[in-house]
Image (cartoon, grey):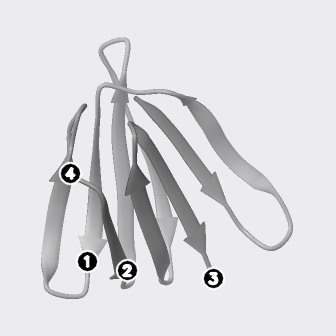
Amino acid sequence: MILKVISAHDILFQGEVDKVSLPGAEGTFMVLPHHASLISTLVKGAVSYESEGRQESIEVAGGIVDVDNDVVSVCIY
């Protein structure tokens, strides 16, 4: 699946990932390949992802996420 993390100023990450953990308003949730479509707000926390066995994370102050057709688009503040 493809993860895109973008801000108003830059693309922070774009690439193939195995899973993504996101800080949702109702709690942290995980997105795996073939996840159902969804849109959610994000709160302050870490967007964590695993790619090729490596774990990485990006701290965010909040934002929104759109999951559709194996593309996870994260727009952050």
Q: Of residues 39 and 19, which is closer to you in this image?
A: 39
- CA gap, disc 2 and disc 1: 4 Å
Work out whether mark 3 precedes mark 2 in sequence or the reverse, and give the earlier one: 2
- CA gap, disc 1 and disc 4: 16 Å
Q: Quadrant of the C terminus?
A: bottom right
- CA gap, disc 4 and disc 3: 25 Å
Question: Horizontally, is 74 left or right of 68 in the view?
Answer: right
- Identify the residue position indicated by label 3 in the image: 77
Question: Horizontally, is 28 left or right of 50 in the view?
Answer: left
Measuring from the top left, give residue 5's x and y in whole percent: 59, 54
Measuring from the top left, give residue 7's x and y in whole percent: 72, 68
Cβ–Cβ under 8 Å for marks 2 and 1: yes
Cβ–Cβ under 8 Å for marks 3 and 2: no
> Residue at point 40% right, 40% down?
69
- Identify the residue position indicated by label 4 in the image: 36
Q: Quadrant of residue 1?
A: top left
Question: Alpha-carbon neighbours of circle 4 within 10 Å: few (<14), some, or many (≥20)?
Answer: few
Question: Alpha-carbon neighbours of circle 1 within 10 Å: few (<14), some, or many (≥20)?
Answer: many
- Identify the residue position indicated by label 2 in the image: 42
- CA gap, disc 3 and disc 2: 10 Å
Work out whether mark 1 precedes mark 4 in sequence or the reverse, and give the earlier one: 1
Work out whether mark 2 precedes mark 4 in sequence or the reverse, and give the earlier one: 4
